[in-house]
Image (tube, rainbow, N blue to C red):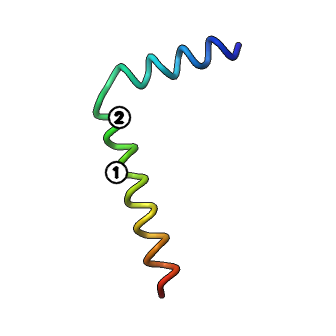
């Protein structure tokens, strides 16, 4: 089960570069929002 999940995850990561880019942007936005919230 674990091997299948890891292989599936790797396949998903290799499939579309847009998905990883969107994830990266989402993380950046989330960190920015959290930092701005902690400041205020």
Which residue is identified by label 2?
Answer: 19
Above or below, 4 against 18 in this view is above
Above or below, 1 against 35 in this view is above
- Residue drawn at x 54%, y 14% is 7
Name the N-terminal-most of marks 2 and 1.
2
Are the two marked residues, 2 and 1, in contact with CB atoms closer than 8 angstroms?
A: no
If the image is split into quadrants, where does the N terminus sit? top right
User: Badge 1 local density, few (<14 within 10 Å), some, or many (20+)?
Assistant: few
Q: Which mark is residue 7?
A: none
User: Extreme left residue here?
Assistant: 18
- Residue drawn at x 40%, y 67% is 32
* Residue 23 location (% of width, % of height): 40, 43
Cα separation between marks 2 and 1? 10 Å
- Residue drawn at x 49%, y 70% is 34
Above or below, 28 against 40 in this view is above
User: Badge 2 local density, few (<14 within 10 Å), some, or many (20+)?
Assistant: few
5 relative position to 20: left or right: right
* Residue 2 location (% of width, % of height): 69, 17
User: Extreme bottom residue here?
Assistant: 40
Q: Provide the secondary structure element on which disc 1 rests.
A: helix
Instruction: State the count of labels.
Output: 2
Q: Provide the secondary structure element on which disc 2 rests.
A: helix
* Residue 28 location (% of width, % of height): 38, 57
Q: Which mark is residue 25?
A: 1
5 relative position to 40: left or right: right
Above or below, 24 against 1 in this view is below
* Residue 30 location (% of width, % of height): 45, 61
């Amino acid at each position: 089960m674990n091997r299948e999940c890891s292989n599936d995850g790797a396949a998903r990561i290799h499939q579309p570069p847009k998905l990883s880019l969107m994830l990266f942007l989402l993380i950046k936005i989330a960190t920015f929002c959290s930092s701005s919230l902690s400041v205020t």
